[in-house]
């Protein structure tokens, strides 16, 4: 994209995974640009984002319609975001990543799936819980459902949420935005399982604390790389195992509810300590990246995404 230089623009070595320095538009000018684009699209863009969220809620969690319902949700989200952000929709969705980053994310997903499988197998064995995977249940098509289900969540509740917050809250440090979004991530799990899902069960505070830490890790990965590749790898590898079958008590044969599964696996003290330590390291890493790039407020990483996403509306 062509960007006109002037004395108010500076060049930062952007610490995205590509490592390519790009010219950064100051946030004041960026927000002014987004304000003008918002004025032109004051109804279209918010409506398209709202419809994307509705598509997520209606199709992304209902495999009873078809195991491809999450794929249909992805297609709807892509179409709606394309309408809202034109050719820049991949930037706002966090889907613009290099082939190298994509390969690294897939490799990370494979490695983490193996590690997570071993951990969950160990943690449930302590409580006498028996796991039956979906292949044994003859329900393996739901693994494909999980691929797009996690992808859709990372687009809407990951990249789009974080990049919009960075634009609307320019004075707030990216780490605080990450932590706030992680708090929302944990709270949403607690509220949905308690009041929305039919099981109406409670996720305990230890598991919610672990979810908060995992949310920080995911958010920092997006803010550091300006795409959802590694965040999606974490989410996918976890859900493939965690929701990849049926869990029953060895003695009674009763099936665990999903909230009970959260409390059993994520409420484990070893998991909580590990998640908190990794989230602390992820926060230090993001702080170091921002400091190294000579960025105080705002982050040049997400500004680059927003710059591309709004550039078309300037006639680039």
Image (cartoon, helix red, strand yellow):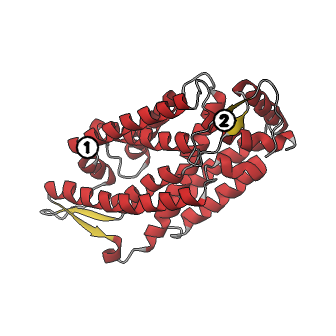
Pointer 1: what residue?
A: 267
Q: Residue at x 20, y 54 (%)?
A: 123
- Looking at the image, residue 174 lies above or below residue 100: above
Q: Residue at x 36, y 64 (%)?
A: 244
User: Which quarter of the figure has residue 9?
Assistant: top right
Q: Label 2: few (<14), some or many (≥20) within 10 Å?
A: many
- SS type, badge 1: loop
Name the outermost residue toward the top.
171
Q: Residue at x 30, y 49 (%)?
A: 262
Task: Name the residue nearer the viewer: 16 or 211.
Answer: 16
User: Which quarter of the figure has residue 270?
Assistant: top left
- SS type, badge 2: helix
In the image: residue 207, left or right of residue 30: left
Point out the tag, 1 or 2, that comes first from the N-terminus: 1
Disc 1 and disc 2: Cα gap in Å? 36 Å
Task: Name the residue nearer the viewer: 257 or 297.
Answer: 297
Task: Name the residue nearer the viewer: 212 or 69.
Answer: 212
- Looking at the image, residue 90 lies above or below residue 163: below
User: Which quarter of the figure has residue 161?
Assistant: top right
In the image: residue 186, left or right of residue 228: left
Pointer 2: what residue?
A: 303
Name the outermost residue toward the right.
315
């Amino acid at each position: 994209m062509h960007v006109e230089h002037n004395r108010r623009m500076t060049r930062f070595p952007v610490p995205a995974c590509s490592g390519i320095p790009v010219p950064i538009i100051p946030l004041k000018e960026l927000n002014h640009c987004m304000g003008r684009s918002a004025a032109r699209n004051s109804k279209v863009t918010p409506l398209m984002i709202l419809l994307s969220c509705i598509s997520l809620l209606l199709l992304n969690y209902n495999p009873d319609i078809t195991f491809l319902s999450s794929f249909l949700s992805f297609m709807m989200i892509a179409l709606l975001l394309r309408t809202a952000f034109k050719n820049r929709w991949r930037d706002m969705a966090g889907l613009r990543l290099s082939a190298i980053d994509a390969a690294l994310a897939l490799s990370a997903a494979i490695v983490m799936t193996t590690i997570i499988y071993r951990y969950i197998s160990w943690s449930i064995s302590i409580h006498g819980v028996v796991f039956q995977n979906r292949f044994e249940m003859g329900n393996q098509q739901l693994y494909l459902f999980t691929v797009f289900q996690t992808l859709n969540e990372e687009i809407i509740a990951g990249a789009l949420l974080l990049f919009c917050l960075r634009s609307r809250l320019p004075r707030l440090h990216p780490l605080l935005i990450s932590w706030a979004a992680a708090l929302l991530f944990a709270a949403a799990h607690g509220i949905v399982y308690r009041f929305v899902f039919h099981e109406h069960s409670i996720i305990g505070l230890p598991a919610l604390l672990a979810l908060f830490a995992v949310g920080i890790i995911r958010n920092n990965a997006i803010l550091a790389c300006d795409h959802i590749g590694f965040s999606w790898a974490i989410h996918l590898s976890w859900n493939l195992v965690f929701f990849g079958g049926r869990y029953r008590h060895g003695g009674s044969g009763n099936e665990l509810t999903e909230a009970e599964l959260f409390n059993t696996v994520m409420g484990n003290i070893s998991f909580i300590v590990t998640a908190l330590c990794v989230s602390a390291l992820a926060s230090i890493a993001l702080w170091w990246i921002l400091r190294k790039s000579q960025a105080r407020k705002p982050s040049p990483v997400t500004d680059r995404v927003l710059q591309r996403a709004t550039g078309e509306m300037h006639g680039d």
